[in-house]
Image (cartoon, rainbow, N blue to C red):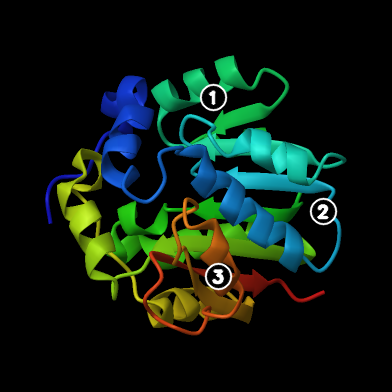
Amino acid sequence: MSNKVDFDDYTNNYNELLRESTGFFSANEEYFARYKIELVRKMVNRKPGRILEYGCGIGRNIPFLRTAFPSAHVEGSDISQASLEIARRDNPDTHFFVERDEAHLTEPVDLIFVAGVFHHIPVAQRAGVTRKLFDRLAPGGELFVFEHNPFNPVTRRIVDNCPYDEDAVLLKPTELKSLIKGASLSVEGAGYCLFVPPRLSALTWLENVLGWLPLGGQYWVRGLRPT
């Protein structure tokens, strides 16, 4: 594995790099944020009052979380200070904090959204991070994690060629489920996603029936903190 990627180095051209990596699937990089958050909106057990995006980067997902859950208080956190500066600029009504500063998270949350983060976390630290997420959830709170599918050869090629994925170590769904269970969360669901490019709109219905097939570009796992 390469040295740990410093996301401060990619804040100014993150969206450009994302478009270069995924443009063949969707020319609009916002598609991925809308898609994932709509999945979450359909699956949540209850309307969340407080939401945390863990590893929010430059805040690309925040507007879609606020739209999907308009009555919720949304916060974002990341280890990259430079990324958070852009997130604050683009989302001035949202509270952001650096992950090293625990004091900024004052109340438990009902929903934690984590997208494309775990493959950047060193393997030895993943269990500790998952336990931290458990601690931040209120009883009955839900954790939704989206990750790259290591079984998809196109996904692996994208990751191999993406500058900010140089440190990536992809996780199988079984590993992510094990981490979630090991943090005293129950696994309430899992599935594969991102099968059909949005330009093939006549086939997007397949997304609703192929969740069992390990060929989607990504996958998701849903955890629940017991009440």
Residues 218 and 88: in front is 218
Answer left or right for 169 relative to 14. Answer: left
Q: Which mark is residue 207?
A: 3
Q: In percent of the image, x 63 and y 63: which residue is there? A: 143
Residue 106 in sight from this viewpoint: no
Q: Compared to 100, does 217 lie above or below?
A: below
- Of the numbered discs 1 and 3, the one sitting upstream in the chain is 1
Name which quarter of the figure residue 217 lies in: bottom left
Q: In percent of the image, x 39 and y 78: which residue is there? A: 175
Q: Which residue is mark 2?
A: 48
Q: CA distance from mark 2 to mark 3?
A: 25 Å
Residues 71 and 21: in front is 21
Label 3 amino acid?
Answer: Glu
Rendering coords of residue 57 (x, y %): 46, 35
Name which quarter of the figure residue 14 lies in: top left
Q: Which mark is residue 87?
A: 1
Rendering coords of residue 211 (x, y %): 53, 78
Label 2 amino acid?
Answer: Pro
Quadrant the C terminus occupies = bottom right
Q: Which mark is residue 177?
A: none
Mark 1 Cα shell of 10 Å, populated few (<14), some (14-19), many (≥20):
many
Please identify, in this view, whether the residue under mark 1 or under mark 3 is nearer the observer.
Answer: 3
Disc 1 secondary structure class: helix
Disc 3 secondary structure class: helix
Answer left or right for 58 relative to 47. Answer: left
Q: Compared to 84, does 152 lie above or below?
A: below
Rendering coords of residue 136 (x, y %): 67, 54
